[in-house]
Amino acid sequence: MTLGFIVGKFYPPHRGHKHLIEAARRQVDQLIVMVAAHPSQTIPGELRKAWLEEIHPDCDIRLVPDELDDDSQQWADFTIRYLGRAPDVVFTSEDYGPVYAGLMGSRHVMIDRERTAFPISATAVRSDPLKHWDMLEPCVRAHFVRRVVLIGAESTGKTTLAQQLAERFDTIWVPEYGREHWERKLAGRTLDDPPPSWSHDEFVDIAQEQQRRENLAARSANRILVCDTNAFATGTWHERYYHARDARVDAIGAADRVDLYLLTPPDVPFVQDGFRDGEHIRHWMHTRFAEQLGSQGVAWALVHGPYNRRFELAEEIIRERYGNSLGV
């Protein structure tokens, strides 16, 4: 059985790495891919390993600490100790490859040294991942996608704005799951019927499902993902009904990844669509959201005025932050 071997940081994995690994895998019976990770790197080694396992399920992905100098002899000695033998074939796209393989008595195969098949580097991806979007696999894109979250009180135009922004930037948006849940609760009722009650566990379920859908959509988004609310905002809805926070909901919200919040104020007329019940507390909710965003340490902006003006402001803010990297 022929054992092939690749070592690298994969910081992060890109299409050039994929080309290398796929080409190597076709030439051996077993391929071990070693991910060298250091605590100073901003993308955890465990995450890079998980990405490679998803992208290359037929390979044996290993994670090791990146503690050695850039010395081929040190790495050759370490590799043999770690594997318990020398690999039969070492695959690289780097000049160190022949020397490193030779020190282990392994055959070396150079693949696309000039980067003609995929002119990309991990350094370039880290410097501007949106610019190099086409060089990333969906699971890696989900990590780098810029998440723009709209929050605000009822009937402040969030859903319409989310749809408009997604269309403008040729991407997708994540609807508000809490709204979908509420519509199911109201099924068969009229506005004259007393509203159904909420349980604490419902807010936990809503926050979890909202976050699950957002993380799934991040894999398919085009550079930015527009979200009509998120799990963080669900905590404030719990506060709206119970006049207190729920630590479980807040813990889910704390795990949200957000690059930019857009807050829609209640300076447009309230529209009753048969499902809304919060007209009397719109200003309280807006004030509460603003207070929370101010203490979050996350970028946020107010998009106010008539609906068309809100869209113009939101588009301008997004373009100022991400510039030409959006590709549209």
Image (tube, helix red, strand yellow):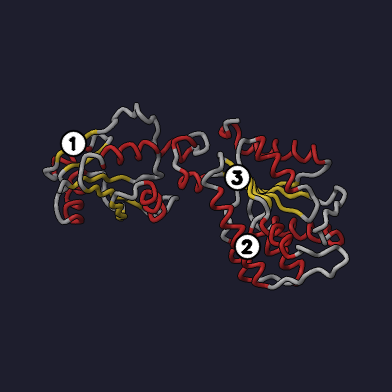
Q: In the figure, is residue 5 to the left or right of 175?
A: left
Which label number is shown at residue 207? 2
Q: In the figure, is residue 58 to the left or right of 184?
A: left
Amino acid type of the residue tagged 3 in the rendering: Leu
* N-terminal-most mark, 3 or 2: 2
* N-terminal-most mark, 2 or 1: 1
Residue at the farthest left position: 105
* N-terminal-most mark, 3 or 1: 1
Q: Is mark 2 on a helix, strand or loop?
A: helix
| Disc 3: CA contacts within 10 A as few (<14), some (14-19) or many (>=20) | many
Note whether residue 243 is visible: no
- Label 1 belongs to which residue? 98
Amino acid type of the residue tagged 1 in the rendering: Pro
Q: Residue 89: image x %, image y %? A: 18, 42
Amino acid type of the residue tagged 2 in the rendering: Ala
- Label 3 belongs to which residue? 225
